[in-house]
Amino acid sequence: DRVNTPLPSSPSALALASQARELFVTRVAEQIQILAQTLPEHLSNLLNETRDAREMQKRRDAWIAFPKISTAWVKQVLQDWHAQAESTGNTLSSNLGGLEGLSLIEDDTVENKILASRMALRLLDKVSWDLNDLTVRMKALENIDELSKKDVLRPESLATALLEAWQSVGMEREVWPLVQDKVLELLCDKLPGAYQEVNALLIRRNVMREID
């Protein structure tokens, strides 16, 4: 049984759903800012490891390049992510997880989708419980059957924005593995709290106070 106050998909309910997404985006944006500040040190530490000449050159290049584009990267991630937030809607036909028409998509896009999916699986391992509760509440608020595949609340949406922005500002995808574990380490630590905060907001507003 669910103890809650039924909410029709009224303008006020939709406004609350929008407020919930904005809170989530704001909290995650704060972590992206922190990431940009911590990655230079991470890349510097990688230079202390012994690898072959080619790998060491790649690491040096990344260490030199990232601080120059870190601000632009954060801006691009948030810009892309906000665009997804604004375009969220279950009428969207775009499906990041779909396989239709892959032959028509550029190799880079396919590779990004694969990487984003793998990142999303690791994030889901940490946030699935909180995300599931939030999904139930958002579906009730918006009177929908499922969240859009592009919904900012889905980890793959964030992972896609991180990856695509990385390349948009001039960093090569081949360099991404150097930072991916550090990115996931921080997000796996902080994302659960972001989902919990949004759930708490909705509970205070009497949106499905209990979910079995």
Image (spheres, rainbow, N blue to C red):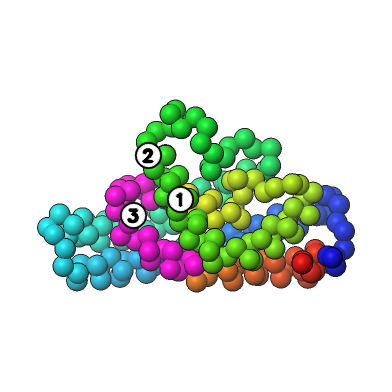
Amino acid type of disc 3? Trp
- Is 61 on the left-hand or right-hand side of 96? left
Q: What segment carries the magenta color?
A: 162-188
Q: Nearer the viewer, residue 6 or 63?
A: 6
Mark 1 element type: helix
The residue wearing badge 3 is 176
The residue at the point 26 percent across, 57 percent down is: 62
Mark 2 Cα within 10 Å, few/some/many (few <14, many 20+)?
Answer: few
Which of the 4 quarters of the picture holds residue 198?
bottom right
- Is 63 on the left-hand or right-hand side of 35? left
| Nearer-N-terminus badge (1/3) | 1
The residue at the point 45 percent across, 44 percent down is: 113
- Is 155 on the left-hand or right-hand side of 2? left
Estimate the x, y position of residue 177 in percent, counting from the top left. Answer: 33, 57
Estimate the x, y position of residue 119 in percent, counting from the top left. Answer: 45, 56
Amino acid type of disc 1? Ala
- In front: label 1 or label 3: 1
Q: Is residue 84 above or below residue 62?
A: above
- For the C terminus, give its image quadrant: bottom right
Evaluate whether residue 196 shows in this view: yes
Mark 3 element type: helix
